[in-house]
Image (cartoon, coloured by chain):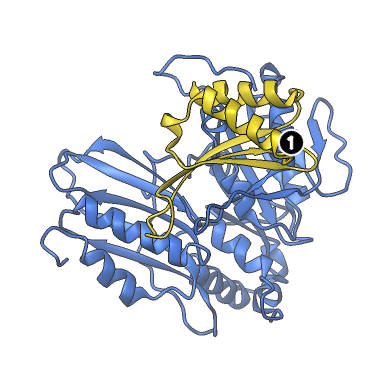
Chain colours: A yellow, B blue
Amino acid sequence: MLVRRLKGVVRDELRLGIDVPIVIHEALCSEESCSPYETIIAVLDAPPSTFRIDLPLPEVTPQMVRELIRRHREEGKT
Amino acid sequence: MVEATQDPSVDTRVPVTVLTGFLGAGKTTLLNRILTENHNLRIAVIENEFGEIGIDDALVIDAEEEIFEMNNGCICCTVRGDLIRILGVLMRRRDKFDQILIETTGLADPAPVAQTFFVDDEIKELLRLDSIVTVVDAKHALAHLDEVKPIGVENEAVEQVAFADRIVLNKTDLVDAESLDALTRRLRSINAQVQILPAVHADVALSEILDVGAFDLQRVLADEPNFLQDSDHQHDQTVTSVGIECSGDVDVELLNAWLGRLLVERGVDIFRSKGILSMAGEERKYVFQGVHMLFDGDFGAPWGSDKRLNRLVFIGRNLDRAELNADFSACLVSGAA
């Protein structure tokens, strides 16, 4: 299952324990000003953090998630 | 979380019942009955209200409310982080129980609890929200429902009724028949489709509230005798339900555009939605349900000899029946119901 694989990447990259919940949600929006699809990865740690990719969930790859988290880290967002 | 057994013919997901109700309505009485009655079910209880439940072998976990918003511009979705964390812990002990029951506080908003079961594929694979059961105190409920709140503050009692699949109308022995009638009309004015189960000391048949499949897409609206019951407008109320029933085939693109727009623009006010639709060129029923802006739909059983009929229900705040009817009719292939 893709969601489980993506969560595994998030746990690895952020060195999270199994008790930290991760939620991955594909949000759709029909408004012209919005991206029609957005995959939201929420890490419900203290404090919580969120990673967003403007793609439908099935198109999100583990590599994209890995790179996004590393970019956030380099930018001091995580 | 652990992996679910991969047998497509058997639904191995754990049914989850959410128990709501205003303070003093009798939730704990009902919970104690559920835990002590001889039903051969092992029920894990997640509670977030202080109090002791002295039941042997019961799995009771305390939780603190932790609401997390997962928004993307227009679509607002809230989940309960504390609940997800506890569910994760529970699912690692999957062999210890058959069902999960979540008791919310009397002031909890049911939406984040319900939405928690729709946001994430892994959660959806392991758990299924079975129903929202709201316990109502027959003697004091009207006062709670009619309480005027400051602008911007929700009336939690109204929301709990609006979200309910089953209402346990408790303490009926404390009121006369006239008062009970008035309260029943008031409850139906908010949520016309809900099944109301009168009770004394929360003595309802547990088969009426546990594992009832109220969120099961294949059972959506299957047993809704009050589907088109009119709301009672004797009160100046804003939370009501609107049922739409009409024949005609639905154009999928028009429907998607309408529902997408409706949920973005009005999703905050639409607490629950569900329906069975006759889609153009499709032999199977299309069934859907939503909690605020979250929407889940799929094709179900074939129509077969059943009359192809569209049936939708919206429960929410400031609903415009005429507008909903007109907008849905515009989604029909013929353009009219």
Q: Quadrant of the N terminus of chain B?
A: top right
Q: In the rendering, at what x and y percent does residue B143 appear?
A: 70, 77
Position of residue B258 measured from the top left corner of the image (x, y, whole percent): 31, 61
Residue, x 28% and y 44% (percent of image)? B286
Looking at the picture, tell me which residue is in the foreground, B98 or B159.
B159
> Chain ID for label 1?
B
Given the image, on which type of amino acid does mark 1 rest? Val
Q: In the structure shown, which secondary structural element does the residue marked by tag 1 occupy?
A: strand
Q: Quadrant of residue B197?
A: bottom right
Residue B247 drawn above or below residue B278: below
User: In front: B175, or B77?
Assistant: B77
Write the residue at 72% across / 41% down.
A77
Q: On the image, numbered disc 1 is attached to which residue?
A: B45
Q: Position of residue B222 (x, y in %)?
A: 35, 46
> In the shown orientation, is residue B335 left or right of residue B51?
left
Q: Is residue B179 above or below residue B205?
A: below
- Image quarter of residue B142: bottom right
The crowding category of the residue bearing disc 1, from other C-alpha atoms within 10 Å (few below 14, some 14 to 19, many at least 20), is many
Residue B144 sits above or below residue A10 on the image: below
Viewed as shown, does residue B19 lie left or right of B244?
A: right
Q: Residue furthest left?
A: B334
Up-down relation of residue B216 to residue B3 (above or below): below
